[in-house]
Image (cartoon, coloured by chain):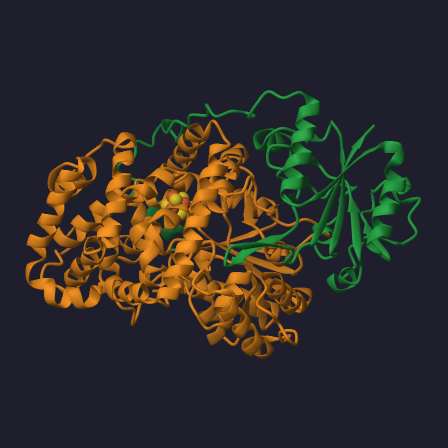
Amino acid sequence: MSSRDVVLARVRRALADVPRAAGPEEAPVPRDYLRAHGDESAADTVRLLAENLADYRAVVHDIHAAGLPALLAHLLGERGSRSVVVPAGLPAEWLAKCDVEVVPDAPERTPGELDAIDSVVTGCAVAIAETGTIVLDAGPDQGRRRITLVPDHHICVVRVPEQVVASVPQALERLSPRRPLTWISGPSATSDIELDRVEGVHGPRTLEVVLMTP
Amino acid sequence: MSVTDLGMPAFPAAAARATRDTRLRANLRHATHTIRDKRARAVGELADWAELRAAGRAIKDRTLRHLDHYLERLEEAVTAAGGRVHWAADAAEANRIVTRLVRATGEREVVKVKSMATQEIGLNEALAEAGISAYETDLAELIVQLGKDRPSHILVPAIHRNRSEIRDIFRSEMGDWGRPAPEGLTDRPGDLAEAARLHLREKFLRAKVGISGANFMVAETGTLVVVESEGNGRMCLTLPETLISVVGIEKVVPTWQDLEVFLQLLPRSSTAERMNPYTSMWTGTTDGDGPRTFHLVLLDNGRTDTLADTVGRQALRCIRCSACLNVCPVYERAGGHAYGSAYPGPIGAILTPQLRGTASELDASLPYASSLCGACYEVCPVAIDIPEVLVHLRERVVEGGRVTRRGVRTVIRPAKGHAAERAAMRAAAFAFDRPGVLRAGQRLAARTRRLHPRRLPGPGRAWTDTRDLPPVEAESFRDWWQRTRGGERGSGQEGAK
Ligand code: SF4
């Protein structure tokens, strides 16, 4: 007997008391929790997102689409970034005003090469106001998971209001499990040393979120 | 069966040592109280917490009651998405599978993201025997590994170390494992984190094999979920070419939608955050992004035995948030090491004796490592009635009864007169000879009563009554205790002080 059969047989024996003929539906799951907490307007939801992002030490910027290239040039310049990696599908005009080396990501780029790059700029799939979370789904303007991990500075552009949802349940409805997903709530952090929160262990130590309105 | 099985003192002896260690106690107290208060605030933000908790409990119960069905769905979905699924009946088999998979890559090093399952099975030791170095990458696990130590808390495994100890460990040990600590390293938490970042980065960048656990596995889609803070999880999950995830069979949830419940319950219960910094979700493999090869090792190792116990099986609902540790008056005094397994605190007291059985002195004493105050049940996001299971397991130790061990039904004899019983009695003495512990218990018991008025029938009655009736009855429990402990007093006291 394979271990698979052994384990499954043990499970079945262990559940002799359960009336299983009717299938899993015999065990009811009440779902009377809320789809979202509060009944906010789109504008309020965006405001809540900004608040919660900032609460977990992300740096938040508001901008109209027309001002984005100038803002990105300013943010990269201010930080002194010399190079920025970008996913293949990032709109080219976003970085049109930047005076840094723009490195398009490609599958052959090694972790070591990414480690030598200062910043990364991406879009996102969805942002969650109640938790201050941005979710990346490796879409064309987000790229491979590693490019938002190895460089120390991540700028993420959220299209407001259409990419913003209020809650975790609403976010999951929009996301596909078939894509690799990264949920990001503030820069990486640890509380492992006497429970003092320290920002930035392995992921980018600086997370900037740009809320871009049309 | 597990690395910590042999040579471990029973709970009361280990707890007594920890109780004498004032620094450990101060660290623990500070830590548990800080998280406890923060958690209450984070939970208070959600008006529907009770409904989320009820849903979380029900989803897990549905999963457990039809576990074979969901495991088969999961296997199908993971395989269809390009992953390979392996089944391990016990720790030794899981270790063999992982060792074989690592060997097949030709690599001698792996990077690991904190996983209680791999700690439970002693994977690092098994890999070391095969000549493979496993590097822990979670900051706390790194501290523990460099300090040649064992974790003492689910969430903050190095909770027993303070900042100057950590600095000393980094200074003296990092060089032996890779990049040494920077010159003149201070004990500022920021500097210590930076030292860890530099030390581990070189390992991440060259790693070819990553090993992880998972917080959830979605049967419907084959998706695995890892919830973390530091980014070491993302490193291990995305940079290596081969990823091996070792996951207990109880971690499966039926549907994608179910994550909406657990991703609200877990971060708030665990780190007391609205959301943890990073959550990774992956389904099989993705071309050009992340590992090319993905192995999922499904681990039984006593879980099906636990499932066979209709009272005890609720322990398998646990999502390892550690909220129960942080409110436990016994844990606060005893520390995590006293529990002698990967699972400390109240959850360890009910899970370990079920996963491993109660044959050893230590494991038989664990169900007594509690004052039955009920605070753990109250904070548990999946409503595990830990006191109920403790009482049930105590009965089992004292009276014997039917259990399932490695899939085989058997009857265990009462522990009377047995070393296990003496250990158990000393553990009870540990809790009940400390008025502070018991008082805290009684205060909280009043609140639990409202939430959980149920009582156990039969011999369990004596114990449940102490939890459910007014303090005057609790007093009589102490009388009962004084009476029944009788001749054990001499040795028991020695162990408990
Ligand atoms: S038993 Fe409940 S409170 Fe304790 S770790 Fe598990 S889920 Fe959390």
Question: In the rendered view, would you say B383 is above or below A31?
Answer: below
Please give the name of the residue rendered at 31% of the width and 51% of the height, measured from the top-left corner. B329
Please give the name of the residue rendered at 57% of the width and 45% of the height, measured from the top-left corner. B276
Q: In which image quadrant can residue B56 be found?
A: top left
Question: In the rendered view, would you say A21 is above or below B328?
Answer: above
Tell me residue B12's x, y (percent): 24, 62
Tell me residue B29's x, y (percent): 39, 55
| Residue B228 visible to the viewer | yes
Please give the name of the residue rendered at 18% of the width and 68% of the height, measured from the top-left corner. B494
Q: In which image quadrant can residue A208 be found?
A: top right
Q: Quadrant of ligand 1?
A: top left
Tell me residue B4's x, y (percent): 35, 67
Lateral position of residue A87 relative to residue A53, left or right: right
Lateral position of residue B326 relative to residue B403, left or right: right
| Residue B348 visible to the viewer | no
Question: In the rendered view, would you say B107 is above or below B297?
Answer: below
Nearer-the-camera pick, A22 or A58: A58
User: What colour has chain B?
Assistant: orange
